[in-house]
Structures are given as C-alpha cells and as structure tokens.
Image: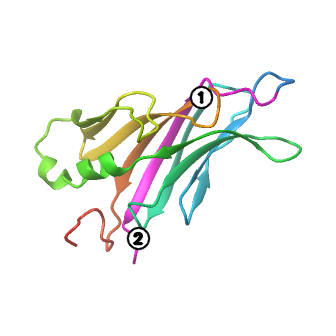
Amino acid sequence: MDTLGLLRIRVRRGYNLIVRDKIASTSDPYVVITTTQQKVKTNVVKKNCNPEWCDEVSLSIKDLNDPIELTVYDKDTLGADDPMGTAEIDLKPYIEAARLRKELQELPNGCALKKVQPSGTNDLADESRIIWENGRITQDMRLKLRNVESGEVLIQIEWVDIPGCKGLDPDF
C-alpha cells in the first residue's frame, strides 16, 4: 500500500461566518476538505453563521507534503453553492510531534508537546497546541478563513496508523 495512514479531522464549529443569503441575513454553511486525490464534506447547518458541525471525516494520506485545503460553502437551493472562505491545514508541526510518540509513553495526560503560533505561513487564528492524551496526539486548530471578510473554523486533527502501512516512521 502506498498509503501512510489516516488523518482524522473533527470539524467542530464555525465562528462569525459571512452572510451569503442576503434576504434571510444568514447562511447555510458546510465544509469541504480536499487533497489532490480526495474530497470529504460535513453536513449542512441551516441558517447559522456560528454553526456547530461536530462532524468527523478521515483522509487517506499518501504524501505528507500534499496540501489539505478546507473550504466553507453556503448551500443554495438554486444555483451553485457560494464560497465562504478557505484555509490550509498545516500538518508539518503535528507530524514532527507525532513522530516522537514512541518516546512519549511516560508523559502525563494533557501534556502540550508543542505550541504553534499564528504566522504568515499558516492560517491559524490563535495559538494551537499539540496535546498528548491517553496515548493519542491531537491538535486543535482555529483557522482564519482567507478570501473573505470574516470567519473562522475550529477543527481537531489526529493521525491514525493503519496496520501494514508505513505510517509516520521515516525509517520504515
């Protein structure tokens, strides 16, 4: 298999999303997450610019350098859905921390492995922490949407190894 593993993405909620349905003064947002080979989407939350999706999607990862794009859309009954902004999920800090997981077994639960600050090279709206909890490494990210006046999306990422796949071990 050329798959390295799965990236589990929990799409939690949106904040201050732009109004696309001018008549109703609201939007019907959903999130699409894409790589060069896959596309997954969340459910639509009707009439809400601060939606709670609480959806979980998984992407099969073959290349750690493959960009992962998150796009928010407004669902329209007639015509094409309206874009509400985009953000890129930067995996590099998470992968660096996750590669150390074999050495982390003795750490206490809730230990922050790394803090990632917003910068010009990521779409973070706020500091993001990579956390060790119950043998799992997760990262919560509050992403600021680009190409739009306002909007943020809160997600959580987690790597899932698949038996027989290379995983994150660079020496496999």
Pointer 2 or 1: first along the chain = 2
- Pointer 1: what residue? 151
Image quarter in which the C terminus is found: bottom left
Q: Is residue 6 above or below residue 83?
A: below
Residue 151 quadrant: top right
Which residue, as the protein is rendered here, is positioned at the far bottom? 1
Q: Nearer the viewer, residue 95 or 65?
A: 65
Rendering coords of residue 55 (x, y %): 55, 42
Q: Amino acid at mark 1?
A: Gly
Helix, strand or loop status at disc 2: loop
The local secondary structure at tag 1 comes to loop
Residue 5 image point, x, y percent: 38, 64
Q: Nearer the viewer, residue 55 or 87?
A: 87
Q: What span is in magenta?
A: 1-21
Which quadrant is home to the N terminus? Answer: bottom left
Q: Nearer the viewer, residue 134 or 70?
A: 70
Residue positioned 89% across, 44% down in the render:
78
Is 86 on the left or on the right of 143, as rendered? right
